[in-house]
Image (cartoon, grey):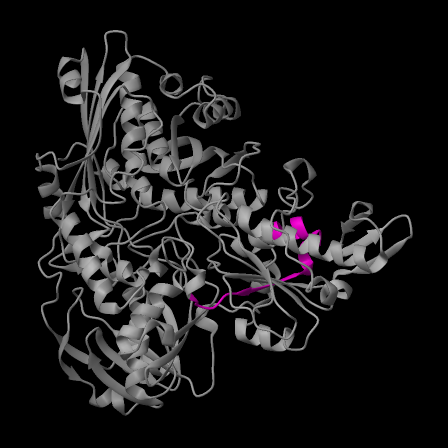
Amino acid sequence: MIEVSRRGFLSSTLVGGGALSLAVTVGCGSSSPTRVRHAEASGELVANMYITVMPDGRIALAVNKAEIGQGITTGFATLVAEELGVPIDHIDVHFADSHPEYRTSFGMHQTGGSTSTHEAFGSLRHAAAAAREMLVLAAAANWRVPVAELAVADGRVRHAASKREASFGELTRHAARAPVPDHPRLKPPSEFTTIGKVNRRIDARAKVDGTAQFGIDVTIPNLVHAVVIHGPVYGARARKVMADAARTRAGVIDIFAFRWGVAVVAEKYWQALAAANDVEVEWSQGQAAGLDSEKLRLAMRATTADGTTTRDDGHAPRVLGEARTKLEAIYEAPYLAHAPMEPQNCTVKVDGRKAEVWAPCQSPTVVQAFVANAIGGDSDQVIVHTTLSGGGFGRRVVADFATQAALIAKQVGRPVKLIWSRESDMTQASYRPQSMVRMQGGLSAEGQLAAMSAHCISQSITLSSGAILNAALPGPRALRGVVVDSLLAMFSTNSMGDLFATEGIKDTPYQIPNLRVDFTPVRTKLPVATWRSVGHSVNGFAVESFIDELAHAAGQDPLGFRHKLVAPGSRQRRVLDALAAQSKWGEPAPKGIGRGLARHQSFETEVGEVADVEIVDGRIKVRRVYCVVDCGIAVNPNIVRAQMEGAIIFGLSAALDQEITVAGGVVQQRNFDAFPPLRMFEAPEIVVQILDSDQPPTGVGEPGLPPIAAAVANAIFALTGTRLRRLPLQHAWDQRGEK
């Protein structure tokens, strides 16, 4: 993958002449309108996404999404290669810099919500198809032959009858003068030669040979390095800084307190880190002082108020009261850190009220707003260059690290690269909220699910996202603040449900005649944010565990019970049927193995999973996971498979062992020794089946995660007869019998 800036790309190609440049507005869905324009060879076209055919026949593709390991650069290149008729290795990818017209997701230039491929599937193919037709029209005009007699393959236009052919690069000047077709022909799936067929990744070589540039690799002239000493409690400020010894260390440039802690700046990173170890700080109390996650858990369990109703079908309270069999269960989930392998980092160059930023970020829009606010400028005075990211999972939508880097750069008057320690990354995070879901269900005399209710209690991600919402809105900063304050006031008065807290329950595909879903927000001073699959990560565990409990109470097979709750011909039925066949569901499990099932729909993708689990010396061991996914057209099947595998491993880490606990406002887990990801020797065999589909692609980055915790918990019940309703499951297993 070739990575160059948009400005560098344009100056080195378009101005030289002989290039056909196409821009496309990528909307929020595959059916949204597309605008495609062309520019004269000497002109610069400012647009959301570029497909540029170069004079040498190569294709330059600007991607307005972050590559955080999910393979979006390969996915976008695949779409363009398919419609242009070029080999995928003829496409050079570079990341689009921050620009208002790149705001295609939630009003922002952002990567999240497993939406990237879905957004681009129609629009980006449309732009590539238009380019192909313009090149064909240019060849037809040059050769004075009908368009119908021309064919495109391998980046060349050919006329079989006369045996003439020309490369795309030879046709760009003529094509740039042609009108842009409004309705270019898109290939039907039956003609695909690249989509669904090519499985390799275009960024693999660079990541293997070390030439790929992540945020932590950025270097620019006159650069200095910084670390930040953060307080023990989130929001604590330095009252007194004792740094005389640290200031005498080699390379140290400055040590100063600012509103986020204490900045230590040196010529080299290791010099800054060594100096930071010599600094002593007296801290203020901190905004999260006194928070105790165990006390919070008990308070949530004691909550009895109904909260805000987000779905109310039929007469759930009455039918539950009249049900022949009634079940009630509480499911709990802890705070979680995102903990990407590349810790938070950012490089910032400040020039008065202007700034240039290099960041492994998921939202250049948010980074622009945060940096502009830090230096007293406007967002359009901040340029953000997106780099590769070593994981994100939602954490890199938040831009606190960019704010800190900008403040430090402004103070020292030189470009600064800030790198957080792992301890800062873990203790200064924006966490997945601690959550509780109270489920109630009623079975009819015939064993049918007659009614269900769910009461979700958690800290509100929406209420914690005021600064991000502010960044997303257009217009003057003061006006944006008024609008955001008004929106948050509606949420804080509980007159509106949170955007994420009940997802996966309020939109369940289960056909339940009487269903009620409520939400009660919890307020603390610890920040929370979207975490991989967001509300689905908790609600998938709650619903699929509870459905399993209802199936056993009804004396029915868990898969058969679910089968009756979903519509005939639905994605859910297809996945359940395939999962039953793949896992040989219904056959006796091997001795000592418990088998559990769960399914969940998130980001418009249906995923079903079966987990084979055993208990060895008190330790929960997941031996095998069967996974079936219906995600529409799989643009790159290997990437879809990798995302399912990655989400399952990520979800198992959280399901089995990970939690963030808080005592006296202090986060207790500071590194991976106390927040352990699944190790390689612990990883189960994962068997993934991708169902064939001719529907547009839906999300794959997150949907593999929500079913896994429930599948494991259900397997433990099948093996031992013990229901575990609290995450992490290993902790719940060790503490079973305790309240």
How many marks can you see?
0
Q: Which residues are magenta?
A: 78-99
Is 80 displayed left or right of 437 in the figure?
right
Q: Nearer the viewer, residue 692 or 181?
A: 181
Q: Nearer the viewer, residue 604 or 217?
A: 604
Percent position (x, y) of residue 343? 37, 65
The answer to whether residue 494 of the structure is visible from this angle is yes
Percent position (x, y) of residue 263? 26, 79
Does the magenta segment cover residue 511?
A: no
Is 85 displayed left or right of 547 in the figure?
right
Res 603 → quadrant? top left
Q: Nearer the viewer, residue 649 or 65?
A: 65
Q: Relative to 212, say whether 505 is above or below.
A: above
| Image quadrant containing the N terminus | bottom right
Q: Residue at x 52, y 51 (%)?
A: 34
- Residue furthest out toward the top: 446
Percent position (x, y) of residue 496? 18, 43
Is 245 displayed left or right of 396 in the figure?
left
The answer to whether residue 667 of the structure is visible from this angle is no
| Image quadrant containing the C terminus | top left
Q: Residue at x 26, y 40 (%)?
A: 727
Res 135 → quadrant? bottom right
Is 58 displayed left or right of 93 in the figure?
right
Percent position (x, y) of residue 20? 66, 65
Q: Relative to 405, say whether 693 is above or below.
A: above
